[in-house]
Image: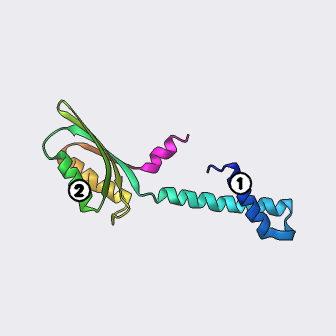
Amino acid sequence: MNLNYEDIKSIVTIVLEELGEKASPTLVKSALQKTLEKMEHREKKENIDSGRAILTAFGVNKPGVLAKITTALSNHNIDIEDVSQKIMQEFFTLIMVINITNSPKDLTEIQNVMNNTAQELGIKIYIQHEDTFKYMHRI
């Protein structure tokens, strides 16, 4: 969690106002720790609930590959937010940012559906939640 000076000042002011005259260094420290834990929990929940995932696919190009992938996504009410595709001779690569928020299926179920689609097409399809990429770059 990234807090600037103003954020910290605001949190400390709120805690001091809540504690009033009984504010001691120990009580302030304890109240601040609880407040920060709540904020971290809320921030993690917001990030996890983003509903966005990255789909990558690659293999030998043939007519209808993109159509079958997008149809499988559409059948499960998955929104495509961004697409990048490249054909290199007889091979294709595809990267999509998808939003699974409105899908009745969870990420694991969607991965299974797309694995079946990949097997039908003889290609590889991988789906990872966008948080995987966010946290990879934090380390």
Identify the residue at horizontal 56%, vertical 57% (top origin). 43
Q: Is residue 137 magenta?
A: yes
**94 vs 81, nearest the viewer:** 81
Dominant secondary structure (helix, strand or loop) of the stretch shown in magenta: helix
Q: Quadrant of the C terminus?
A: top right
Q: Residues within 10 Å of mark 2 (few under 14, many from 20)?
A: some
Give the residue displayed 17% in from the left and 38% down from the top.
61
Q: Looking at this rendering, what residue extends furthest in the top direction?
A: 89
Residue wearing tag 1: 8
Q: Position of residue 8 (x, y in %)?
A: 71, 54
Quadrant housing residue 84:
top left
Q: Does 31 appear above or below 115?
A: below
Q: State if disc 1 and disc 2 touch (CB < 8 Å).
A: no
Say above or below: 19 vs 45: below
User: Where residue 119 sits in the image (x, y, percent)?
Assistant: 21, 48
Name the residue at the left extreme: 63
Secondary structure under the numbered disc 1 in the rendered image: helix
- Determine crowd level at label 1: few under 14, some 14-19, many 20+ residues with C-alpha closer than 10 A: few
Image check: 32 left or right of 63? right
Percent coordinates x, y for residue 104 in the rendering: 33, 66
Magenta residues? 129-139
Closer to us: 123 or 13: 13
Question: Which secondary structure, mark 2?
Answer: helix
Residue position for label 2: 72
Q: Specify whether residue 51 is painted magenta.
A: no
